[in-house]
Image: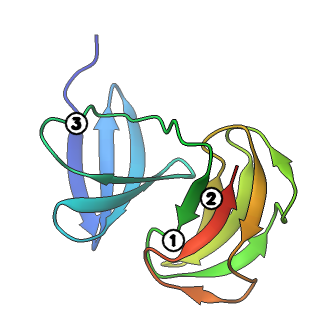
Amino acid sequence: MSNSPLVTRIGPGAYRVEIDGRAEIVHVTGAPGHRWVHWRGRVFERPFAADEPAVRRSTERHQSLSAPMPATVLKIVAPEGTQVRTGDTLLILEAMKMELPVRAPADAVVRAVRCREGELVQPGTTLVELE
């Protein structure tokens, strides 16, 4: 049985979440009612509505991954046509002096890469399309 998490704001959009003796850093950005969350190398985009389950799984065949915050594309790891598995790193962003890997949410094929190394991308910019 887990205890309630202790959440401490450590900077703009940055939070330290402590639960069961572990601490994690979580980054949050976006407009009220619609947030992007970066945690453990994964990016979650979700509107916050009271009737939605905490975790959603996409049933769509095509999926787009977007920038969670202003960032620079450091490296494209999985070019167009690459077969990826859940959790594989697709590309690496740099934001707030930290490297942020963007990972595949499911087994897929990289259909398109919509950014290039060195490019500054804004929140919501489509980076990769998967199918």
Using the rendered image of the protein, determine whether residue 76 is visible from the camera's viewpoint: yes
Res 55 quadrant in image? top left
Looking at the image, what colour scheme do you see? rainbow
Q: Is residue 43 left or right of residue 7?
A: right
Q: How far apart are marks 3 and 2 (CA)?
A: 24 Å
Q: Which is nearer the N-term, disc 1 or disc 2?
A: 1
Q: Which of marks 3 and 2 is in front?
A: 3
Judge whether 15 appears above or below 52 on screen. Answer: below
Q: What residue type is labelled 3?
A: Glu
Residue type at tag 1? Ala
**Gap between marks 1 and 2, in whole Å?**
9 Å
Secondary structure beneath dot 2 equals strand
Residue 99: % across, % down: 62, 68
Farthest-out residue, front: 61
Judged from the image, the secondary structure of the residue bearing numbered disc 1 is loop
| Residue at screen point 48% across, 78% down | 96
Question: Label 2: which residue?
Answer: 102
Q: Residue 52 carries which label?
A: 3
Q: Earlier in the sequence, mark 3 or mark 2?
A: 3
Q: Answer with left or right where residue 26 lies relative to residue 60.
A: left
Relative horizontal placement of residue 109, taking residue 10 as reference (left or right): right
- Percent of width and height locating residue 19: 31, 31
Identify the image quadrant of residue 111: bottom right
Q: Which mark is residue 67?
A: 1
Question: Circle 3 sits in a helix, a strand or a loop, which is it?
Answer: loop
| Above or below for 128 versus 73 | above
